[in-house]
Image (tube, rainbow, N blue to C red):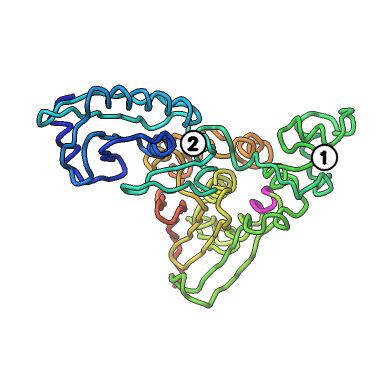
Amino acid sequence: MENSFLKDLINRAEDSTIQLKRDVTNSTKLGSEFVAFSNAKGGYIIIGVDDDKSIYGLSDADISRINQLISNTSEQNVKPPISPFTRVFSLEGKKILLVEIDEGINKPYATNEGIYWTKKASDKRKLSQVELQRLFQSTERMYADEQLLKNTSLEEVDLILFSEYYEKEFGESFHESGLEIDQLFQNLKLGEKKHLNLAGLLLFGKKPQYFKPAFMIKAISFFGNDPEETLFRDSEDIKGSLSKMYQDGLAFIMRSIHKVQNNKGFNSLGDPEVPKLVFEEILVNALIHRDYYINAPITIFVFDNRIEITSPGKLPNNLSVENIRSGVSIIRNPILTSFGSRLLPYRGVGTGIRRTIKHYKNIDFINDDESERFQVVIERIAKVK
């Protein structure tokens, strides 16, 4: 790294990747900066430069002291520890210490006081609870569907639904297993200590929305093409287990669209204007892959010219629309995903979107970062007049 690079850094205004410090003496404050950089995109702390960008400089004794402070802080004040890289430069005949902190690979990081910081422009702020949960999720340390719901009990389990699943999966009734229901749910990663986790509740709960009211589907069939219209043909709040919401959501869509003759005989029933497979794939993906850290429903809006299916949560971990079109997938809810292939028409190998596009081209996928939602817009062939 040449001095010109350091000069460029100093000449830039402080932002989320650059901090200017005349000196550092406090390990607690320095540890907070390290945590914020590590939880964000990494960055540089330039020591020996005033906020007004004037070169203050450091003595050899200062550099030795600060290097020792950095070493101690990165080990003792950051959890898990990090390894900053330091280098000494000479500018205007004065020594400057450049500290480089990489984006962390073991997010989230916290101070030794248990505070999680991240960068906000040139300053830092505490991570919100939702942001913290997502960081755990992105590093495969915590998933939303694994969260234990302490206000639930095994009395909430729909034993008929669970029995049907168990017998189909294992070839015997769960009573024949010789295990108590709480042990079975723990073995299947659906709960623990007589409580359900979110996956257990959504998959086999009698009334999941009693505990998680937002985790439902709101379906509306509008007159016209404007979502601001107050007139609608049909409306339904779709609740129940994941499999029931899938079945009822699909039924709502299919009764809301037209059938077309497609060169069939006069007495034929005709075909759906959009193939049923399209809605099967998109709806099951919405239920399994939505962000369950966001307390909002999935929505199905049927307009005269299009159908919109919107899931809470943007695509995870830098996944893009181009990625999913080519078959790339990232598991957001591993337990729901593992049961999806048994309870829903879900294959879980990244082929669903590709199969959908193959059968129907008039689909748009919108990954809305700002609103944190993923939307699928399906153009209707038989547009309502």
Amino acid type indicated by mark 2: Thr
Residue, far bottom: 231
The residue segment tinted magenta is 242-247
Camera-nearest residue between 77 and 241: 77
Graded by Cα atoms within 10 Å as few (under 14), some (14 to 19) or many (20 or more), the crowding at tag 2 reads many
Residue for badge 2: 111
Residue tagged 1: 163
State the residue in front, 233 or 266.
Answer: 233
Percent position (x, y) of residue 28?
A: 44, 37
Query: Was residue 235 drawn as part of the magenta stretch in this picture?
Result: no
Residue 152 seen in this snapshot: yes
Q: Quadrant of the N terminus?
A: top left
- How far apart marks 2 and 1 lie (CA) works out to 47 Å
Q: Which residue lies at the image location 45% right of the left edge and 62% below the top edge?
A: 306
The residue under label 1 is which amino acid type? Ser
Please name the residue shown 56% across and 56% down the image: 298
